[in-house]
Each structure stands twice: as structure tokens, then as C-alpha cells.
Image (spheres, rainbow, N blue to C red):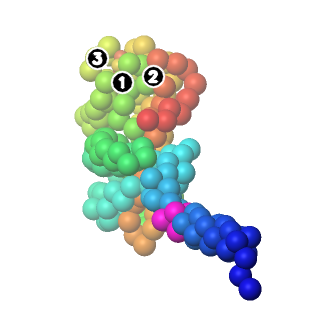
Amino acid sequence: MVTADTNKSRRSFLSFLTSALMALLGLLIAIPAVRYIFGPLRAKSGAGPGFVDVGPLADIPAGEWRLVSVEVVHEDGWRKTRVRHAIWVRREDGEGSQGITVFSSICPHLGCPINWHPDQSRFFCPCHGGIFDPTGNQTGGPPPRPMDSLEFEVRAGRLWVRWQDFKIGVAERVPVNV
Ligand code: FES
């Protein structure tokens, strides 16, 4: 015999079951949405810019300084920006990573672009007369430190460079995240 109490407890159980199923369904829908929204922030936090493919080493004439443009992609959450930077690259004879030098073209004084003058075998900064020798050491003018060298790798005959900004106007090389 079904009593009023039995009916009441059955309704309560069904109500509880429905609520539990709805909560589970909501959770199943919410998890992918939360991962989609916050995934990029989690994946990119603290990550610096990576290596950029500069091209075949063979394209850089041995024994000469070559100004090369590299495009660096900065990712900040969902925002992606592309910035072009100029780097000075030199390689001596050979295929390996030995004898390769890579400098940022940004002057460590106040950030002007540095130029190579092959007739004088010197780098010059046009803004305030900064002078650097072929190894990047400052030999004249106001730059407070040598030219900034950049990290690189040679992979399958191609040059990869990790772009890095440095604080300008100071004697120490202080990496700056952008
Ligand atoms: S910015 Fe290069 S010498 Fe001043």
C-alpha cells in the first residue's frame, strides 16, 4: 500500500536526482568553456619570445656583416602582435654554429639603429656618435655597454635567433620582456 509519506519521499528522490543530473550536465558544458577562455593565459604566462627562423646560413655571405629583418610574434592571451626587428649577423666559413655572431641593431645608448661601415670596419650609431668595433665593443661616444648579442642556434643548415629586448641607457645587459 502506497502511503502519502512514500509518495513524498519518492518525489524528493526524483527531485534530487534531477538536480544532480542538471548539475553534472552544467559541469560537462562548463569545463571545455573554461578551458577555452583561460587556456591561452595559462599556456603563455611567463613564456618569452621563442626562436625565429632567419633562413639558410648559406644565404649569409661568409666574412661579411649582413643586416637581417626578423618577425617576432608576441602572444598575450588572445592578442597576437607581429613586430619586425633588425639584427646584424656575421658568419665565418663553415656550416656549423662556430664563427657566427648575432647582434641586436638597437643601440644600447638610447635605442637608435646601428649601422655597419665596412670601409672603416666599425659599427656607428648616427644619433649621438656611438662607435663599436667589429666584436661589438663600444669604442667611442656615449653608449654605456657593448652591442647586445643575441642567442642563436643552427638547425639543419638554417639560422634561428631568439630576439630579446634589453634595457637601454644602462651599463648592464638587462633583458626586458615585451
Ligand atoms: S642612441 Fe646610439 S649613440 Fe645615442
- State the mark number for residue 111: 1
Question: Ligand 1 within 8 A of label 2's CB?
Answer: yes
**Which quarter of the rendered picture does the C terminus lie within?**
top left
* Whole-number angstrom distance, CA of label 2 to CA of label 3: 14 Å
Question: Ligand 1 within 8 A of label 3's CB?
Answer: yes
Q: How many marks?
A: 3
Question: Residue 21, located in which quarter of the rendered image?
Answer: bottom right
* Whole-number angstrom distance, CA of label 1 to CA of label 2: 6 Å
- State the mark number for residue 127: 3
Residue 173 as seen in the image, left or right of residue 11? left
Q: Nearer the viewer, mark 2 or mark 3?
A: 2
Quick one: SS at disc 1? loop
- Are dots 1 and 2 in contact, CB under 8 Å? yes
Residues drawn in magenta: 25-29
Mark 2 residue type: Ile
Q: Is residue 56 visible?
A: yes
Residue 6 as seen in the image, left or right of residue 102? right
